[in-house]
Image: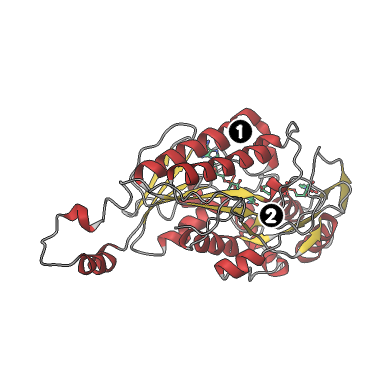
Amino acid sequence: MAKEISNGVNHGTSKPPPTPSPLRNSKFSPESLELPSLFSSSFWMDLHLLCFANLRILVTGGAGFIGSHLVDRLMENEKNEVIVADNFFSGSKDNLKKWIGNPRFELIRHDVTETLLVEVDRIYHLACPASPIFYKYNPVKTIKTNVIGTLNMLGLAKRVGARILLTSTSEVYGDPLEHPQTEEYWGNVNPIGVRSCYDEGKRVAETLMFDYHRQHGVEIRIARIFNTYGPRMNIDDGRVVSNFIAQALRGEPLTVQSPGTQTRSFCYVSDMVDGLVRLMEGDHTGPINIGNPGEFTIMELAQTVKELTNPSVPVNVVENTPDDPRQRKPDISKARELLGWEPKVGLRQGLPLMEEDFRQRLAIPREN
Ligand SMILES: NC(=O)c1ccc[n+]([C@@H]2O[C@H](COP(=O)([O-])OP(=O)(O)OC[C@H]3O[C@@H](n4cnc5c(N)ncnc54)[C@H](O)[C@@H]3O)[C@@H](O)[C@H]2O)c1
Ligand SMILES: O=c1ccn([C@@H]2O[C@H](COP(=O)(O)OP(=O)(O)O[C@H]3OC[C@@H](O)[C@H](O)[C@H]3O)[C@@H](O)[C@H]2O)c(=O)[nH]1
């Protein structure tokens, strides 16, 4: 049973969660196999682990940037079966092309605001546009995705006894007044701003996760992801690292939104995927911050991309958008302690890997 509840602190509720759904593990449970009585149940449990220690895993949003890297990682284990459900709003089949046709892989065009009935053991629930440009494009749809989509996935988890992980966000801390941000910080979020469909949507999604956990015994995990970058990001995604690399490669000015002193902490995608899998398979509900604590101003990021990719491009300061958080840096003590996780790839190592991928997709070879 998960060890933490309610923002990492048990706020006075001594009532244990109700017994999980009787359907939990029904697929493989010794009881459901009508075993001959001469074999003990521990014998069958060992046999189960040897023969059936496979998992059927649903990844919502699996055609997106982080989701597709997560699918690669899960598919590496030949005992896993992976089902992706995605509406392709910001993701693409291209990201999954190497798995299409593999008998252990299924791709479903599905919008999580509609119910989904599949028998699975794990649900990685990523479906949600993540780039501010994409999530602000249709804010009502964004909040529906976060609220109704998460309700649907929790309903599924409850019904089939699956463990569910939500990819929440550092944006639940809003424009943070505490720095760095620990999981105990409740945040400083504008409830009626242009970012609220995403920030508040994810906050409600976290609430739903804990309510299903406390009320129905659903096994939950919550990751609070900080800015993540890497190969396969949508080239016109609109987020800062992809914008700067694409601009530098195209020889266009890098657009630093004013003032440029705002900070972010950038995590390379392979580190992120490692953290998500550790959280899912560990014993802790979270929420747990997963991110790289290395903190950079956006101007420093622009100068680094310019230096590494194209020293001749200018850096322009342009107008910003409302409610842009002024600082962001994760405290990852919990991830270190509870998951044995910390990031390995620094910004100066990760940027060239992403540049290489962008060069291939933009057909801009490196000049010797
Ligand atoms: N990348 C980051 O820096 C970051 C930071 C914090 C949190 N996150 C979270 O991680 C998750 C993945 O982010 P990403 O960077 O890979 O973004 P992404 O936009 O590349 O991927 C999101 C995926 O969800 C799909 N999707 C969107 N709405 C859907 C819906 N209604 N039904 C089904 N599919 C839908 C999209 O088509 C896409 O494939 C998101 O939940 C995001 O909020 C990401
Ligand atoms: O071209 C650009 C794009 C962005 N920026 C700035 O770069 C910073 C980061 O902006 P991004 O759009 O990449 O991402 P944000 O940090 O604002 O939001 C992200 O936070 C975490 C996740 O939940 C999401 O991936 C996304 O919402 C902001 O200060 C923004 O003003 C630029 O200076 N130039």
| 113 lies above or below 123 | above
Considering every residue shown, the one lying at the far top of the view is 140
| Residue 368 appears left or right of 217 | right
Residue 167 point in image, percent of width and height: 57, 50
Percent position of residue 111, x then y:
48, 35
Identify the image's colour scheme: rainbow, by chain, secondary structure or one colour.
Answer: secondary structure
Side (left or right) of 192 relative to 209 = right
For badge 1, the amino acid type reads Ile
Which residue shows up at 68% across the image and 70% down it? 349
Q: Position of residue 254 (x, y in %)?
A: 81, 51
Pick whichever, 223 or 304, lies toward us: 223
* Residue 138 visible in this rendered orientation of the protein: no
SS at badge 1: helix
The structure residue drawn at horizontal position 39% and vertical position 64%, both measured from the top left corner, is 77
The reply to whether callout 1 and callout 2 are in contact (CB within 8 Å) is no
Nearest to the observer: residue 117 or residue 86 = 117
- What residue type is disc 2 on? Glu
The kind of secondary structure element at disc 2 is loop
Q: Residues within 10 Å of mark 1 (few under 14, many from 20)?
A: many
Quadrant where the N terminus is found in the figure: bottom left
Label 1 or label 2, whichever comes before in sequence order: 1
Residue at image mark 1: 143
Q: Residue at x 84, y 41 (%)?
A: 320
**Position of residue 263 measured from the top left corner of the image (x, y, whole percent):** 81, 55
Residue 345, picture quadrant: bottom right
Determine whether, in the image, residue 5 is placed left or right of residue 41. right
Residue 184: mark: 2
